[in-house]
Image: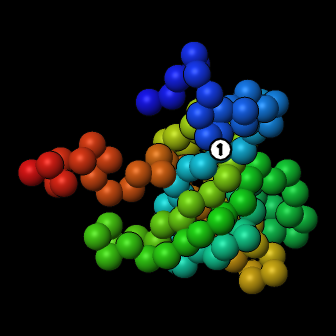
Amino acid sequence: MLSKKKPFIGSAMMDREGLIAPDRLELVGVIALDNRALNGGGHIVEELDEANPHDSIGHITACCYSPALGKYIALALVKDGKARHGTRAFVSDPLRNRFGPIEIVSNHFYDPDGSRMHG
């Protein structure tokens, strides 16, 4: 869909350092493993320390309850996000006193291969 031979809208942005940096934040899906609601702005950490929250690897950007999945889900920006698919971490949100386990997954929560759409 994108041509390297001729210009198009956005072609000047493709090679910007921040967009191709290997350690940039990447969009991932998050599932709450304790069946409690997630909050936007909560940080993702590898080790939970409620008394002294630190070492954030990302943050939650949007969240909701999914009736189709029967779980609370969220989107998050996480360092090396795609490499972390299938791993577990913790949400740390001291302002709302919300701490708990999560799983980092693909951001395609429901029907990732499109089988429902294509019949």
Three-letter code, disc 1 = Glu
According to the picture, the residue beneath numbered tag 1 turns out to be 26
Q: Secondary structure at mark 1?
A: strand
Q: What residue is rendered at 51% in x and 28% in y?
A: 2
- Which quadrant of the figure has residue 8? top right
Taking depth in this image into account, of 15 and 61 the one nearest to the observer is 15
Taking the spot 52% from the left edge, 54% from the top edge, the residue there is 29
Q: Which residue is rendered at x = 54% and y = 78% of the image?
A: 37
Give the image location of residue 97, x and y in percent: 75, 81
Measuring from the top left, give residue 103's x and y in whole percent. Answer: 53, 53
Q: Is residue 64 left or right of residue 22?
A: left
**Observer-nearest residue: 118 or 12?**
12
Q: Is residue 65 left or right of residue 63?
A: left
Answer few, some or many: residues within 10 Å of disc 1's Cα (few below 14, many 20 plus, some between 14 and 19).
Answer: some
Asked whether residue 71 appears in the rendered view, the answer is yes
Q: Residue furthest bottom?
A: 96
Q: Residue at x 56, y 60 (%)?
A: 75
**Screen quadrant of the N terminus:** top left
Left or right: residue 10 versus residue 36 is right
Q: Is residue 49 above or below residue 1?
A: below
Q: Tell which of 7 and 98 is nearer to you.
A: 7
Q: Is residue 46 visible?
A: no
**To which quarter of the image does residue 17 belong?**
top right
> Of all residues shown, which one is farthest toward the left?
119
- The location of residue 52, given as percent across then percent down, is 90, 65
Q: Position of residue 62 (x, y in %)?
A: 59, 69
- Quadrant for residue 69, please give it: bottom left
Is 97 rendered above or below residue 61? below
